[in-house]
Amino acid sequence: MKLEFVAASLCVLIGSYSANAQQDSTNGFHFIPNNLVVSLSVYDNNSGNVVPGTVLPPGCANTTGGCGASTGAPYDGTYPLVWNNDLYDASFGITSRIFLEEMSPIGLVLGSLEVPNSSMSTIGSTSDQMVTSFSSKSELGLHLSTDGRYLTFMGYIAPVDTIDASNSNTPAAADPTNPVGETFLRAVARVDQNGKFQFTETNAYSGNNGRSAILYNSKGADFIYTAGNAGNGSTPQPNGVILGAGAQIITPSSSPEAAQTPGTPTPVASFSVTELGANADKIGKDDNFRGMTIFNNVLYYTKGSGSNGVNTVYFVDTVGTACPNGVGLPVSGATLPTAPLPYDASTLQTNGLPNNMCILSGFPSTPNKSATVTAYPFALWFADANTLYVADEGDGYTGGSDLYTHAAAQTSAGLQKWVFNSSSNTWGLAYTLQNGLKLGTPYSVPGYPTGNNTATGLPWAPSADGLRNIAGAVDGLGRVTIWAITSTVSGNGDPGADPNQLVVITDLLKNVDATAAASEKFFTLRTARFTEVLRGVSFTPGSY
């Protein structure tokens, strides 16, 4: 993405910025090209969403594990105390409304488009609708289609205020060992420049969540690539859970949700640590993907969480020769995948899916079980063929009263700049941008509690821990501007529910070391309000 605006003016304009009131512009909405879109969610702050003493997860009595001997949820649905229920129910979450907030590149809020949901008076039980899960922090990544005309993201086909949908099964991939005894479809939302939505349902990501989607609609193609995670039960996992993990390829639907009948999930790629010579992990869990992008006809993914696999950057090898030992570089002239990954159903339980992914040369390649994990990559964006920016969300440490000092001491969290070395044919980390991000510095949110959360004994106030989703642009003078969504740590029962921030920084493309970038600094454009969380950032549909 190239935008011809003066990046240096950001400092002046940001200083005078103040957030505007959210405007619901669902009627006659129109995105303006080359503006920003931020996906955000707003929790329905209703004490009745959870009745204290309710046994959770929902439907646990119908699962093989049962409900145990618990006395029930300790907290009602009042924000933010409701998220302390996560200490009781590890799958805890409540579905919430999704908004697409349009902003100018300097952070001026121009309007907001609400995704159809059950709380709207015009939406019935069979109407097209979609929600996210508050407080699933990895959801609602935003991506433009390859032709720039559409914006895509993922969610659930469920009513607002549904408990634990984010770890529910999908209808065609039910896992009886999943402690959440509910079933909901996942879906990809596509929205055009005029705010018109189309939804495509999928049975992928049973037991977990879809995180990002990219519509490949150039050169006569019409596919959706998605990233996510599957599985919330015991081993062995059903075939549908294994097939519905990680990287998927989905054919867009033009039918209403009520007329769709999605079938078995269709994986497009898979990685295993056995490619590196390591012992196999739990089937499917090496494919716990978060971020994704397409660059030069290559599909890239990141993995940044979980004890299996490798936290690193991957690419899909469509020629089969790029990485005989699990690490390599894309082959020149390779094409994007256009069909699901062939597999042998008889060996899924023992071998998983065939492997057609590589770790990008120069990025971490030691399995998580064999090393101290220090990398937590989330989103990634190529400024050009030799410059790759990677958002690292930090380690999420909330283990004690040192949570702020721990966050501040991280050296890899923030915005990493990787530069390709053509001599060694590897990518190398040039530096990590943190100045102004204020890692480990608590900030206040109007209406948010002060002091310590009695459930955790730690402060309520959130602080930045790193970055999740990003969007970038290069101007004609080689100035790179990156907009990013922060991750947080706090004493909240689930820090994913913290009001987080949208920040921006300008880097020079030519810089290759930390000394040259020492004066570069993040500025805050938007802080989520009480009951809000920010998730994804992209350019508006119609941007080129």
Image (spheres, grey):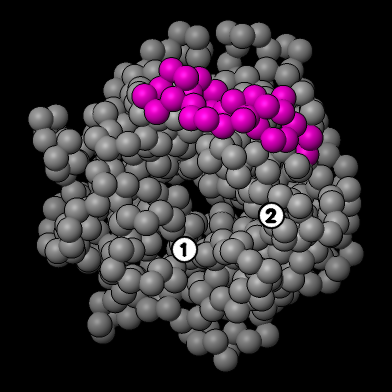
Q: Camera-side residue: 110 or 341?
A: 341
The kind of residue on which mark 1 rests is: Tyr
57 or 121, which is in the foreground? 57
Label 2's element?
A: loop
Q: Is residue 239 shown to the viewer in this render? A: yes
Q: In what element is the residue under mark 1?
A: loop
Task: Give residue 241's mark.
Answer: none
Q: Which residue is mark 2?
A: 456
Q: Nearer the viewer, mark 1 or mark 2?
A: 2
Q: Is residue 54 magenta?
A: yes
* Mark 1 burial class by Cα count in 10 Å: few <14, some 14-19, many 20+: many
Highlighted magenta segment, given as a residue range: 51-79
Q: Mark 1 or mark 2: name the one nearer the start of the chain.
A: 1
Residue 312 in percent (x, y) is at 37, 63
Residue 18 vertical position relative to residue 49 in the rendered view, above or below: below
Q: Is residue 294 visible?
A: no
